[in-house]
């Protein structure tokens, strides 16, 4: 496992559940899945990529990553960890949301 687990201290063993909780991407109101490439995106309050779960695509749904603006060569690809509701909040409110998760 090379994905982080923020639910443990540095001297504790990591777990599959901790990795999913730390790196999972929502696929519905009460569901999340672990996408190995998608888990590598860092957060930005001004992301260049939008992540969305498309339940109607594929056999059981499809995670879609789509550029939301022009991206410069070498620029880091980032997503918002806060979802659509987080984009309309103030900086202080967004920071509080991130700390709560």
Image (spheres, rainbow, N blue to C red):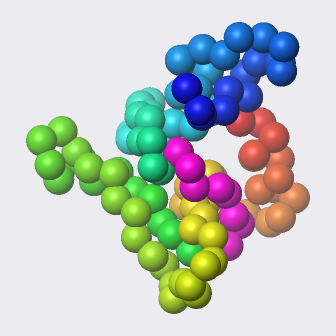
Residue 6, x across and y down, in percent = 73, 28
Q: Quadrant of residue 59?
A: top left
Looking at the image, residue 62 sits to the left or right of residue 85; the answer is left
Q: Which residues are magenta?
A: 39-46
Residue 45, x across and y down, in percent = 71, 66
Q: Quadrant of the C terminus?
A: top right
> Is residue 89 visible in this depiction of the protein?
yes
Q: Quadrant of the N terminus?
A: top right
Which residue is at 42% across, 42% downward? 35
> Is residue 85 visible in this depiction of the protein?
no
Which residue is at 17% across, 53% downward? 57
Residue 97, x across and y down, in percent = 75, 46
Above or below 77: residue 98: above
Which residue is at 66% across, 16% downward? 14
Q: Is residue 40 magenta?
A: yes
Out of 14 and 68, give the one closest to the viewer: 14
Residue 89, x across and y down, in percent = 73, 63
Out of 39 and 24, give the one closest to the viewer: 39
Looking at the image, residue 100 sits to the left or right of residue 92; the answer is left
């Amino acid at each position: 496992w090379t994905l982080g687990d923020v639910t443990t201290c540095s001297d504790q063993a990591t777990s599959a559940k901790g990795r999913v909780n730390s790196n999972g991407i929502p696929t519905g109101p009460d569901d999340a899945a672990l996408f190995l490439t998608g888990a590598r995106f860092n957060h930005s309050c001004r992301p260049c990529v939008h992540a969305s779960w498309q339940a109607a695509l594929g056999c059981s749904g499809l995670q879609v990553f789509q550029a939301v603006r022009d991206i410069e060569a070498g620029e880091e690809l980032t997503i918002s960890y806060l979802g659509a509701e987080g984009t309309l909040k103030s900086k202080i409110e967004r920071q509080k949301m991130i700390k709560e998760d």
